[in-house]
Image: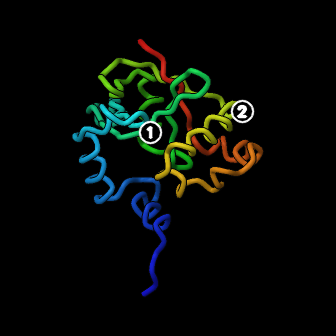
Amino acid sequence: MSKRSRSDKRRALYAGSHPTEKAKAIHHRFIHGPQPRLLPIAAVLQVRGRNSGNIVDLPLAIIRFHGVWYVASMLEGKCNWVENVRAANGHARLLHGRWRNVSLVEVPASERAPILKRYLVFAWSARSHFSVNWRAPIEDFERIAPLHAVFRVNSR
């Protein structure tokens, strides 16, 4: 049996772009721990599920770029939290130091590349889910930008 790299193990936590039971346990510990109140890039997003109608909690990295806060999807394609935010017209709650009501506005794909590059500087655990290296030129990020949703965080 061969050893799997740390990146392979991280990717395996989100098989099929959905968190495994192990990933959900990690999320639960993160959400209920002190990190979202203490770490500068840690946040918890609460959004209403588009099918269940229940409030869903999700740990995210939040980054500041040119004076504006952003959240991004580390997974390519459609993932539940992104679809839930879209269905809720961007209405959500965010724990980043304290709880606040926010409006998440999707950034057009043509504007995502520099934000995604900045995101990977800080969101180390997301790096293994990207098809480009965090040090890659901006052109590489322009190529993958349509695959990763990015939302600007606005106060409500």
| Residue 78 coordinates in the image, percent (x, y) | 51, 45
- Which mark, residue 61? 1
Q: Residue furthest bottom?
A: 1
Give the residue type at disc 2.
Answer: Ser
| Residue 5 coordinates in the image, percent (x, y) | 48, 71
| Residue 106 coordinates in the image, percent (x, y) | 56, 27
Give the residue type at disc 1.
Answer: Ala
Look at the image and tell me in which quarter the N terminus lies.
bottom left
> Along the horizontal axis of the image, is 102 left or right of 115?
left
User: Nearest the camera: 39 or 155?
Assistant: 39
- Select label 1 or label 2 by which is in front: 1
Residue occupied by mark 2: 110
Look at the image and tell me in which quarter the C terminus lies.
top left
Q: Is residue 113 above or below residue 12?
A: above
Asked which colour scheme the image uses, the reply is rainbow
> Along the horizontal axis of the image, is 12 left or right of 76?
left
Q: Residue furthest top?
A: 156
User: Crowding near pointer 2: few (<14 within 10 Å), some, many (20+)?
Assistant: few
User: Nearest the camera: 50 or 28?
Assistant: 28
Residue at mark 1 to residue at mark 2: CA–CA distance: 21 Å
Query: Which image quarter: residue 65?
Result: top right
